[in-house]
Amino acid sequence: MKKLLVITSLTAAGVMGAMAQGTINPNPGGSTTVFVTVSDSSTTSPINNGTPVTIGTPAVTAGFADVGKSSVNISLYAAVSGTSLATLEASTPLITVLNSGSALASFQGTFSITSPYTVTTAAVPGWNGSAPLEFIYFGQTTDGKYSGWSGEATGITVATGTGLAPSIFGTTPGLINSFNITNPVPEPSTIVLGGLGAAALLAFRRRK
């Protein structure tokens, strides 16, 4: 009987652990709005003289034909705080959305994810449901011409119960306060494949 109780308790604890979750506010709006910008890193005649401009109509007006409304895929990544940036960027995104398709240019540099957004332990490897998390975004135009990472949010303790979901954007340290895309940088999957290829090459050389 005692064995049965122990097994039942462990099973219940496992189920509760698997279901652990918390919420965040993943949107860049509000009083500390962070716009997604685009810049051209070409060495000769860069668009807009290489100066970053908000994606959407402002970017199109400045000469970026491929960075209008609803044209940038934005993916959110998460890991336990303290995880290396390379590991965070190589993880599986929690969600991918497009930048705003609003007719108002002032909204097109942002994006919207249902908030509060629920983060689960199943979606973040190694997370116990209570430890602080770190977050980062990757943005890429649908044609792959421009891409880049946002700043990183660190030490974010998710809300539980009726707690107010913390924003991961803002001007205070530890929050995302910049997000610029530019001429191609490797996609997260490409970074991983490149690392695997380099490791394989190194192993081959050591054998020889």
Image: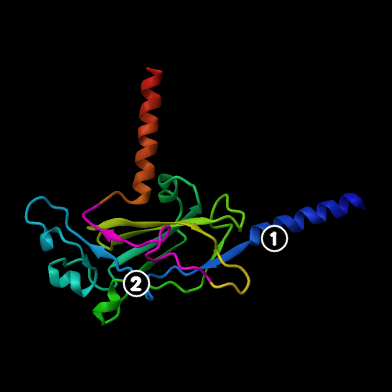
- Quarter occupied by the C terminus: top left
Please state the total of marks drawn on the protein image: 2
* Dot 1 or dot 2, earlier in sequence: 1
The percent coordinates of residue 196 (x first, y second) are 39, 37
- Residue 75 vs residue 43: left or right? right
**Callout 2, which amino acid?**
Thr
- Residue 106 quadrant: bottom left
Q: Residue at x 30, y 77 (%)?
A: 107
Rounded to the nearest angstrom, the CA distance separating label 1 from label 2 is: 36 Å
Mostly what secondary structure, the magenta segment?
loop
Q: Is residue 67 magenta?
A: no
Q: Residue at x 70, y 59 (%)?
A: 15
- Residue 161 vs residue 38: left or right? right
Indicate which disc residue 33 carries: 2
- Residue hosting label 1: 16
Residue 54 vs 41, above or below: the answer is below
Q: Which residues are magenta?
A: 165-184
- Judging from the image, what secondary structure is the residue with disc 2 in? loop
What is the residue that sits farthest to the top in this orientation? 208
The percent coordinates of residue 164 (x first, y second) are 55, 73
Q: Nearer the viewer, residue 196 or 34?
A: 34
